[in-house]
Image (cartoon, helix red, strand yellow):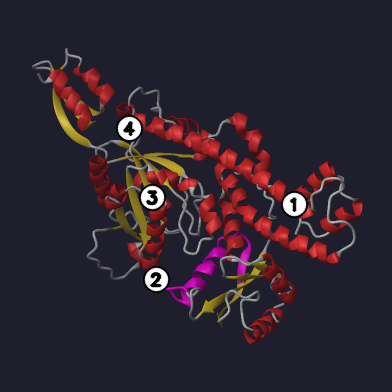
Amino acid sequence: MLFSRVLRALVTYHSLSVTAVKRLHAGSHALQPLRRLLLPPSGGVRHAVRCLWRGTPPCGAKRPGDWHGGDSGGWSSTDEDMDDEEDADDVQELLVPYVPPLQGAQKIFIVHPDVKWGAKKALNTTADLQMAEAVALVQSIPNWTVVDTLIMSTKTPDSKLIFGKGNFQFLTEIIRGLPQLTAVFLNVERLSASSEKELEASWGVKVFDRYSVVLSIFRYNARTKEAKLQIALAELPLLRSRLKNETAHLDQQGGGSRYIMGSGETFFEIQQRLLKERELKIKKALEKLRSKRKLLRTQRSRREFPIISIMGYTNSGKTTLIKALTGDIGLHPRDQLFATLDVTAHGGLLPCRMPVIYVDTIGFLSQLPHNLIESFSATLEDVVYSDLLVHVRDISHPEAENQKKSVLAVLKNLNVPQKLLDTMIEVHNKIDLVPIYDTSEPVILVSALLGYNVDLLKESIESTVLANTGRIIMRIRIKLESPQLSWLYKEASVQEVKVLPEDGSADVLVIITNAAYGKYKKLFCK
């Protein structure tokens, strides 16, 4: 399939013949830009979000200790807040999807190839559980419904038709007997362009693989410029595959030279070059956003707000848990896969009244196509620079152990520091859905939805954050006429000041780093 935008470029710059344009354009899709979803204005809350996410204290404060949040915090921000307005036009064209979105209502027949043995056989799971996840993927897209499902064994998962001759004929008869179908979802990681074309010709409906379905979910849930750019980057392998297949089809039709007039390049070579140019532009734009994020991390570290990354398998309850920890009524968790695609930050207060930033990350998924993992790896960079990791697990899910392995494998590939892995807090969520549950593991059992054990989790987060960041909570007796109090406001987080008028002193509750307390003793405890 060759696409409208590529065709226009060819016509404009290479004088493509009218006959060739008609042949190529006959099968192309109309491009439908992604609807840009903007954050609603929220007045002072949004101002506080911008201030704290950008590394400056909100509410006009000059010190971290002056932040007057609620009991739990309750502000939030996405990476969209860090985008410069003047950069909007520079990358707007890159945000338009080249691969036509899978729009409109779809009635899907899901087929799961069950590999009985060999390298492609899935370990530590069952075909029924894999089918259940495939159904959940389809149900995550609006107006998509599952008509029926089928698990069919195969010995030839790498063949063009996936199944052997007998099973394929049986499957074809089933599909043709369901006239209401609009598409088949074949639950494999990637189909080659030639396989997709041959299957569609045999079955008479669209055929989707895991890559195209997950990419559609990502498109639907993307909010920020960075997420949309990452999706555009993930589309490129699909474009190249389709381009190669379509070019071969055109060559078979014959009729005319394979070269553009005077250019010395074939259709395939020109479009490969155009896709390469697009790839470089997207990577350049993403690198610019990555540099901004690095600068913001530096600014936040100077303000010494601890960063707590909430991560885990998709739909494990991460956003619901953050809502319980922060009391942020603006959060609206959704019970679906990849509901959170963009990195979002949410302010909260620990029991000791220290402000922290909770980072909600993209969920993990087993058998996530490799190109999608690469495209979104930059989004997970913030995990590496956290002060604490909280791994949220849906303990009611039948594949909870496999999900844990998938998450830990991704963390390993991200080269997360060993200290973060060693101090990671494991949370077993949705405990209310498990009638009887007992474990000897050092974990915290919670129900984020019901608020069960959330206070216990806050205490665990507080003690771990203080230890990981070298902070201590202490009371210091100071003299009011000395510069001690102003020094503490500058170098520590002052939580409470109790004046003792009888002797002209004050009792100050502070959260202070070991290094800062060492300086304090040298200056004032001689």
* First in sequence: mark 2 vs mark 1: 1
In this orientation, which residue lies closer to the viewer: 38 or 520? 520
Which is nearer the N-term, disc 4 or disc 3? 4
Q: Position of residue 313 (x, y in %)?
A: 42, 59
Q: CA distance from mark 4 to mark 2?
A: 40 Å
Type of amino acid under label 4:
Glu
The image quadrant that residue 469 belongs to is top left
Q: Earlier in the sequence, mark 2 or mark 3?
A: 2
Label number found at residue 269: 1
Name the image quarter holding residue 503.
top left
Badge 4 local density, few (<14 within 10 Å), some, or many (20+)? Answer: some
Q: Secondary structure at mark 3?
A: loop
* Segment tinted magenta in the rendering: 122-146
Name above or below for residue 475 compared with residue 15: above
Residue depth check, mark 1 versus mark 3: number of the one nearer the observer: 1
Does label 4 or label 2 sit earlier along the sequence?
4
Mark 1 vs mark 4, foreground winner is 1
Q: Is residue 409 magenta?
A: no
Q: Which mark is residue 304?
A: 4
Tag 2, which secondary structure? loop
Q: Residue at x 72, y 58 (%)?
A: 243
How far apart in space, not on screen, are marks 1 and 3 (Cα)? 37 Å
> Which residue extends farthest front?
264
Left-right relation of 473 to 301: left
Question: Helix or strand or loop: what does disc 4 sit on?
Answer: loop
Q: Kindly identify the amino acid type of the residue bearing the numbered disc 3.
A: Asn
Q: Which residue is label 2 attached to?
A: 398
> Mark 3 — residue?
415
Residue type at numbered disc 2: Pro
